[in-house]
Each structure stands twice: as C-alpha cells, then as structure tokens.
Amino acid sequence: PACIAGNVGDNVGDIAGMGADLFGSFAESTCAALVLAASSPDLKGSWCGEMYPVLISSLGIVVGLLTLMVQGTLYKVKDMP
C-alpha cells in the first residue's frame, strides 16, 4: 500500500507541476505580448493592438468552456449493467 500511495503521489505531482508550468508559460507569453504592444511606436496609440493578446486569451477560455459543455452531450457516461 505504501508503494502504491507513493506512486500515486508522484503522478499527481508530475501532472500538477506540468499544468503549473503550462499556465506560467501562457501567462508570461501574454504579458510579453502586452509589453511589446505597449512599447512599440506603431502600436502605442492603437487600442486594438494592445488588446489583441487579451482577446486571444479570452477566446481560449470561452472555447474551453464550450468544449466542456459539448463534451457532456457527445460523450455520455453509460451505466454499468
């Protein structure tokens, strides 16, 4: 039992760490795009240029939520006999 619990803990830690790394990379790239848009002389006065990274991030959230809703209707859980 201790060996199984240790392996489960290792797997959970690996998955949580990978998710945290993925979110960190996503947030850092969004912030970097905002900084580049704010410091660029061509995009400095353009509201659209500065909000483009935020739009892409927001669209990803909306698509993720829609996918969760559609998944429940397409892949129903079947009851075991």
Image (spheres, rainbow, N blue to C red):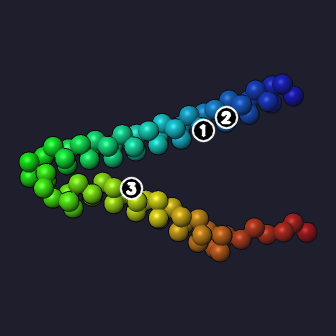
Q: Position of residue 11 (x, y in %)?
A: 67, 34
Which residue is under mark 1? 15
- Disc sitting over residue 57 in the figure: 3
Q: Is residue 69 above or below residue 20?
A: below
Which residue: 40% across, 63% down? Answer: 59
- Disc sitting over residue 75 in the figure: none
Placement of the N terminus among the 4 image quadrants: top right
Instruction: Answer with mark 3 or mark 1, whichever residue precedes in sequence.
Output: 1
Q: Position of residue 29 (x, y in %)?
A: 33, 43
Q: Is residue 63 above or below residue 8?
A: below
Q: Is residue 69 above or below residue 40?
A: below
Q: Distance of mark 2 from mark 3, alpha carbons?
A: 28 Å
Q: Amino acid at mark 3?
A: Ser
Which residue: 30% across, 54% down? Answer: 53
Q: Is residue 23 above or below residue 58?
A: above
| Label 3 SS | helix
